[in-house]
Image (tube, rainbow, N blue to C red):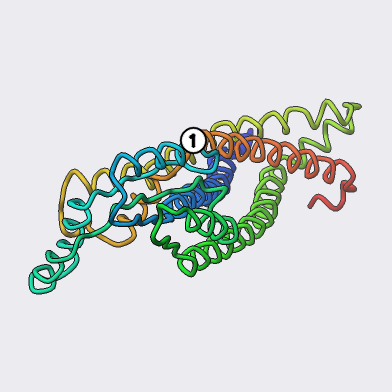
Amino acid sequence: MQENPIKRKKPSALPGILSLAAVMFMLGLLGTSMVGFKGLGKYWLENTSIDIYFHDSISESQVRILETDIQKKSWVKQTKFISREQAMNEMGDKYDPDFMNFVKTVQLPLSVEVYPKSEFAKSEFLNKMAQYYKSNPLVEDVIFQKNWLENISQNIVKIQYALFSIAALLILVSIILIQSNVRLGIYANRHTIKSMQMVGATNTFIIRPFVLKFIQYALIAIPISGVAIWALFWLLPSINEFTGLEITQTTELNFTQVLVEHIDMNDLILISIAISVFGVLLAASASWISTRKFLKTKIENLY
């Protein structure tokens, strides 16, 4: 009686693709957060202002001339002129009516708010600029929120250190995870590898198809992880905004939406390319190392 040959089930590509997608998703999640925090930090720094208040005798035209001169400075992002009426309206939004009745008897000064570029938003530099404009005979006083800026700068540095530490840890974990998964995938083909070696195939001939296969897995995993990150950062906040359902009005989604608003797309594209290249190189190197290991293994140790 003839026995039916045992059919070996072809190893599935799904575990390899999903593991690579999971690794790139984690790195992409962190990378997108880093880009978002960078943009958010830049936004906070550029919302620090030097408030210049002028003497009551100074006319609006004189203030406008000085504002135009300030706008030409290389460190200035923008300026905002505050008229007496606008200053009164802004105070009305902050204080109660009884206090405002008293303030109406006082003439508020003209002022200009000067907002620096993020790279110049440093306590020492802005303090120097504040002292410089305070020496102007047209200026009555200059207010600069030094403590607030220092706190913001310190918090940004702390966030950057935390994110870089997490990035280093995730890279280490991803290397270990991919190496283990690729090794398991090639382990299923260990007998084929040894058979090819025994019939005289060169190491390069044996290794090449495995490396190309896992590179293909990585290329498939890239759009999968990209879609997952897009859904998390862009789709969920959009659903939250358009539906208006209370159940979706969570702090996490609102913060994610704020983070997305400050993402620089050029930085995001660069970090996406870097993660994709890292994933492909990691898959190629892991498959090369694992295949080489089985080529060096003695045949009796394969079982």
Left or right for 274, reference 260 = right
- Quadrant in the rendering for residue 279: top right
Q: What is the quadrant of the N terminus in the image?
A: top right
Residue 109 location, x and y as percent? 27, 57
Kindly state the secondary structure of the residue where label 1 is placed: loop
* Label 1 packing within 10 angstroms: few (<14), some (14-19), many (20+): few
Q: Is residue 207 above or below residue 30?
A: above
Please name the residue shown 24% across and 49% down the image.
83
Front in this rendered view, residue 52 or 159: 52
Front in this rendered view, residue 275 or 3: 275
Please name the residue shown 52% across and 33% down the image.
266
Q: In this view of the protein, can residue 297 be seen by the observer?
A: yes
Q: Is residue 25 above or below residue 141?
A: above
Front in this rendered view, residue 133 or 43: 133
Q: Is residue 161 above or below residue 277?
A: below
* Residue on which disc 1 sits: 72
Residue 151 location, x and y as percent? 50, 68
Residue 125 location, x and y as percent? 58, 56
- Quadrant in the rendering for residue 283: top right
